[in-house]
Amino acid sequence: MNTKVMRLPGISQMTLSIYKLKSVNWSEAPKVLFHKLGVPLISILLFLLLWDGVAAHIQTSLGKVPGPVQVWDQATALYQEHQDARKREAKFYERQEKRNAEVLAKNPNAKVEIYPYTGNPTFFDQIETSIITVMTGFLLASLIAIPIGIFCGLSSTIYTALNPIIQTFKPVSPLAWLPIITLIVSAVYVSNDPMFAKSFIVSALTVTLCCMWPTIINTTVGVSSIDKDLVNVSRVLRLNWFTNVYKIVLPSSIPMMFAGLRVSLGIGWMVLIAAEMLAQNPGLGKFVWDEFQNGSSNSLARIMVAVITIGLIGYLLDRLMLLLQRAVSWDKNAVIR
Amino acid sequence: MSQDKHLEISHVSIEFPTPKGPFKALDGVNIHITKGEFVSLIGHSGCGKSTVLNIVAGLYQATAGGIILDSKEVDEPGPDRAVVFQNHSLLPWLTAYENVELAVKQVFKGKKSKSEMRDWIVHNLELVHMEHAMHKRPNEISGGMKQRVGIARALAMEPKVLLMDEPFGALDALTRAHMQDSLIEIQARLNNTVIMITHDVDEAVLLSDRIVMMTNGPAATIGEILEVDLPRPRDRIKMANDPRYNYYRSEVLKFLYERQKQPQDKDVPAPADGNKLKTGKTADSKNEEAA
């Protein structure tokens, strides 16, 4: 249609441009919108329908497998529980303050104390714990893995020396690491007034051990594949080791490094949930396990809420890394996906 | 320091280890270069021109013989022998200014103050007419402009010898001509000692004091040395009708296409010289353009 009109004789440039303008504003925009928003929405809708249809036909010991509606109900219920717990907590502190104020009014020299609230962690508290734990483990892994990757990329001797160790430990499951880490942490981390809970350290270290490998390997590849001309520039300028790494090696290996970091964070998040489940460390994994043990009629739906939450948070973490990569990458035009 | 022995490439040979045994790329290359001289190395692809340059730069170590610069042997890279690479080799994450700055900071640390360094960087960018795009990254400027920045970076090191590895080989003919004119202009002001690798006959005759013609590899060596005795400054349009210019040009062409035919055996390994084979056609079409 568009090309046909353009081919018609006697239509001035003006009319054509108006026509083009019109076509962009009125006929193209919905098409683009449909492609970007409509297509994913339709596929999600189809998925929900399929889920609903299949779930209704499966009977478990805890009742029927919940469909999207039940899961949504449980999601709002979990949110409500969280709100209620926050209210109770606020009231608890309010009562204490009131009581303390009364005591102080009678006797200004009296010793008063505020006791911490000791309610069960809500679903949202568990999410917070999980995110803090995975970030700690991931940061620690990155701090170890990036330097190792740089050394391996710069020196083939170091690479040959470390490669068998890296390749051996890389495929080890977090479930195998967990008992070892638990025992070692219990033996080594002994303190009367611990800064961090033992369970937190165990989960974070498990994440570290499992997710450092992709970063090491990708950083190694990124560093060792620097443009030979740039290496020669560095040699001609006689840059010292640090300047060479800072000015030439790091910037040119950033895309590969981030590819590794993103895989690492994804693995870390998966590992964390497993570690929390098995080791009874607080977090989303423990929430899933507790609900499984609880075995109420709502448990399956609540676990499904957790599953979807875990997925969405994993997705968000990946987007976060992408933003970080955009921020530190020198090539703002590079296509990053 | 004696004038005629500023840089000696002294009986240089090099062998590269291959699975089939050592491959002798260069055999007894011997050139003495005086201060302020502009020397071109010309030869067919794979003849080891770039290898000679890389040995002078210190990026490769000669198996036999060596490089003597101002009576001292040099066998490792250093900013006293700045290199202009064929593919500009600018750091893509730094602006033109920052690329030159990296070199200036490295060479003049403790010798120049911050403001002196800044002036020196700007001065060198002005020399190659790049002051207007100082704060642009390499991906924002054209191929010719990148090469200008590469030259500015090399000049800013104040090298004793400027090494240029087919500096304009990746540029189109028109840009190349502009760059050659710029180089003539810079050379008239600074009178650097330059070794330039080229496979462009016109470029060699237009720019050089001496043209070193190399035989084909393996075990390549110097075939002939041609003194180019043309008055400076040289103007490409006047040169096109100058009989002496055309004589030098035909001498180089005769060497390349009669005495050293292109290697039939394309399997000859060409370390550090992976350039495409260029035929005389480039030179001819360029001559027409100049005329």
Image (tube, rainbow, N blue to C red):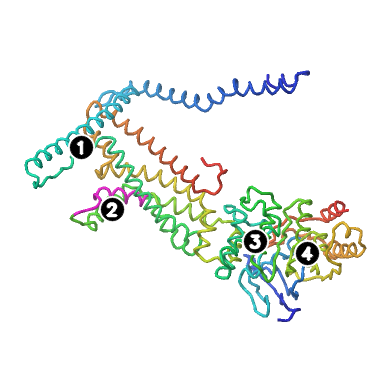
Q: Chain of mark 2?
A: A
Q: Residue furthest left?
A: A106
Q: Which residue is mark 4?
A: B42
Residue beneath the point at 8% across and 41% down: A103
Helix, strand or loop status at disc 1: loop
Q: CA distance from mark 2 to mark 4?
A: 66 Å
Q: CA distance from mark 1 to mark 4?
A: 82 Å
Q: Which residue is mark 1?
A: A120
Q: Residues within 10 Å of mark 4 (few under 14, many from 20)?
A: many
The disc label shown at residue A181, or none:
2
Identify the image quadrant of residue A273.
Answer: top left
Q: CA distance from mark 2 to mark 1?
A: 26 Å
Name the residue type under label 3: Arg
Helix, strand or loop status at disc 4: strand
For marks 4 and 3, the one nearer the N-term is 4
- Mark 4 or 3: in front is 3
Name the residue type under label 4: Ile
Task: Tell whether A169 sits left or right of B8.
Answer: left
Task: Tell whether B17 sits left or right of A260.
Answer: right
Magenta segment: does it hold A201?
yes
Q: Residues within 10 Å of mark 3 (few under 14, many from 20)?
A: many
For marks 2 and 1, the one nearer the N-term is 1
Q: CA distance from mark 3 to mark 2?
A: 53 Å
Name the residue type under label 1: Asn
Query: Is there CB contact under 8 Å for labels 3 and 2?
Result: no
Q: CA distance from mark 4 to mark 3?
A: 24 Å
Q: Residue A124 location, x and y as percent?
A: 29, 35
The disc label shown at residue B153, or none:
3
Magenta segment: does it hold A334?
no
Name the residue type under label 2: Ile
